[in-house]
Image (spheres, rainbow, N blue to C red):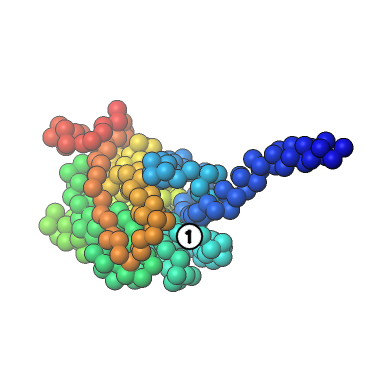
Amino acid sequence: MRRRNFIKGIAISAAGWPLLAGAQQLQSAKRIGILMGYAEDDPEAQRRFAAFQDGLARAGWTVGRNLQIDLRWGSGDIERIKQLSGEIVALKPDVIIGNTTPVSVALKGTTASIPIVFVIVSDPVGEGLVTSLARPSGNVTGFINVEASMGGKWLELLKEMAPNVNHASIMFNPDTAPGGGKYFLPSFELAGSKLGVTTRTAPVRNVAEIEQAISNLASEPGGGLVMMTDGFLTVHRAEAMKLAATYKVPSTYPVAAYAREGGLFAYSADYLDLFFRSASYVDRILKGEKPGELPVQVPTKFELVINLKTAKALGLNISQILLATADEVIE
């Protein structure tokens, strides 16, 4: 009788071993908090998150085995971003990924102790996220997507694509754009003076203002649009591109995917590569390195994507030289 009960006890204990092992494994797993600045239903945003997960997997991190991920989506809404920042920090993760400038600034303002790795931030020094690119110090480091000179490059390419452009506006949301929209302005305005293009700003905070800005450009011949890298505009890019097509305003976009979605052209860093590379810093921090000692990384891959179908709809004849330099031409 005793022997039977003893064996039964062993059987019950053995049956519980897998559950106990799984619970212990999950309990010892590292925890990552992720606050994306984009909308959850954005396919491009999902691809970027997948690239980050791929980077983690290649470094040996698997959700459910040695890793937990708490993921939130800010949808380009500054108030929502602030709320979710507090929510993520309250979970006390081992490291946080902050995507876009307003997200990263909100996270830094919420915690000075939890390591933060930003990805897709243009001016981390100017935003007060780090003291320098070489030695960030503090609890923040990460990956920038573009430098201030890009404002001029976007306008130069727009003028090359559409030689008749004689006045151009750069669009941004002051609440979510780098430097409140001022980061790219010096290079944008300098390029305008060299090219003989009158430059203007187009601050917008909702879709109605996006339409008004594009309508204003179309009211005079020779109008062109430069869309700034900006979490709010990322969320509302479909509306902006549709309006640019409706009003027949030649426009440049700050992310290659936008040209694939119907925009005239885009010149940018490879965002999927930046998300993939950011996983390496998460890996190093989880293994004991300090974010303040990891240099801020700059883009190493850039893409020029031209949508020839959109160009034809706008009546533009793109030069063969420009087409030859493109990384991708959509026909």
Query: Which quarter of the figure is the C terminus placed in?
Result: top left
Local crowd size for mark 1, using a 10 Å CA cut-off: few (<14), some (14–19), many (≥20): some
> Which element is circle 1 on?
loop
- Three-letter amino acid code at disc 1? Asp
Question: Which residue: 38% across, 49% down?
Answer: 279
Left or right of residue 136: residue 67:
right
Q: Nearer the viewer, residue 253 or 70?
A: 70
The image position of residue 329, as x and y in percent, is 26, 32
* Residue sticking out furthest to the top: 331
* Residue sticking out furthest to the right: 1
The reply to whether residue 213 is in sight is no
Left or right of residue 193: residue 74:
right
Q: Quadrant of residue 147?
A: bottom left
Question: Which residue: 29% across, 35% down?
Answer: 307
The image position of residue 126, as x and y in percent, is 30, 69
In the picture of the structure, the residue carrying the numbered disc 1 is 94
The reply to whether residue 276 is in sight is yes
Question: Which residue: 51% across, 49% down?
Answer: 67
Left or right of residue 142: residue 19:
right
Question: Which residue: 29% across, 71% down?
Answer: 131
The image position of residue 201, as x and y in percent, is 31, 61
Q: Nearer the viewer, residue 257 or 201?
A: 257
The image position of residue 32, as x and y in percent, is 49, 54
Query: Which quarter of the figure is the N terminus placed in?
Result: top right
